[in-house]
Amino acid sequence: MIFLSQLFKSPIETGAIAPTSEKLSKLIVDMANLSEKKFVVELGPGTGVFTKEIMKNIPKKSEFFSLEINDEFVKETKSNNPEATVYHASAKEIKKYLRQHNQDKSDCIISGLPWGALAEDIQIDLLNEIYDSLELGGVFLTIALLQGLMFPPGMRFKKAISSKFKKVERSKIVWNNLPPGFVYHCIK
Ligand SMILES: C[S@@+](CC[C@H](N)C(=O)[O-])C[C@H]1O[C@@H](n2cnc3c(N)ncnc32)[C@H](O)[C@@H]1O
């Protein structure tokens, strides 16, 4: 229900009618291979479906925070994942929050941002911030919706990550997601 109400208030930022399915949430976190990661950052947690999988899989000694622009979603993610650190902030502020944690770079950024709904300048700003916040060899994972491959913002996003990152791979399509989606796994 919260997704529909927030979609009504902030359609572009919310960018979906429902949370990502458990199957796709597990897939993105499995592909991140968290057992090897030291500092994990999540962007756009919504109701915290990826956060839940991250909390289950992140090593105890690793650090984590999540950045969410919508205060209602911050509350929801925190209430569903009381052990997670969730800031009410834009994904454009990754470096600022890394500094607060005495870190320069992350080795893993996991995104639920609605790339297919975002304007080109916002996509570019966010991708630059993500790229600059990752260490060399660090990974950026994001969900993408199948329909996005057919529309300009999704096509633009695919082109942008392919030209920016050293290696970009696509997962299989998860059909039991509303709408069907997949994961991009990008290595800096
Ligand atoms: C499509 S929803 C995905 C939510 C959740 N990750 C999931 O998969 O169910 C997009 C989320 O990104 C958040 N968001 C959009 N733009 C953002 C930004 N610039 N910084 C941080 N969060 C943002 C929205 O508020 C929303 O929670």
Image: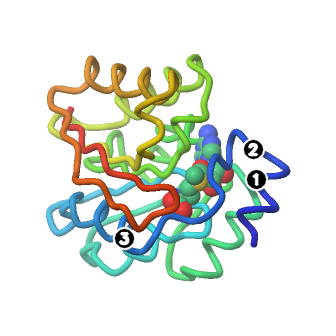
* Mark 3 residue type: Ile
Judged from this view, the residue extending furthest toward the right is 9
Q: Identify the residue under disc 3.
A: 54
Residue 171: x, y in percent? 22, 51
Gap in angstroms between the C-alphas marked 3 and 2: 26 Å
Q: Residues within 10 Å of mark 2 (few under 14, many from 20)?
A: some
| Residue 19, numbered label | none
Report which residue position mark 1 lands on: 7
Which of the marked residues, 1 or 3, is nearer the chain's N terminus? Answer: 1
CA neighbours of label 1 inside 10 A, class few (<14), some (14 to 19), many (20+): some
At label 2, the amino acid type is: Pro
Mark sitting on residue 11:
2
Q: Secondary structure at mark 1?
A: helix
- Residue shown at 21%/59% (left/top)? 31
156 versus 108 height, above or below: above
Helix or strand or loop: what does disc 2 sit on? Answer: helix
The mark that comes first in sequence, 3 or 2, is 2
- Marks 3 and 2 close (CB-CB < 8 Å): no
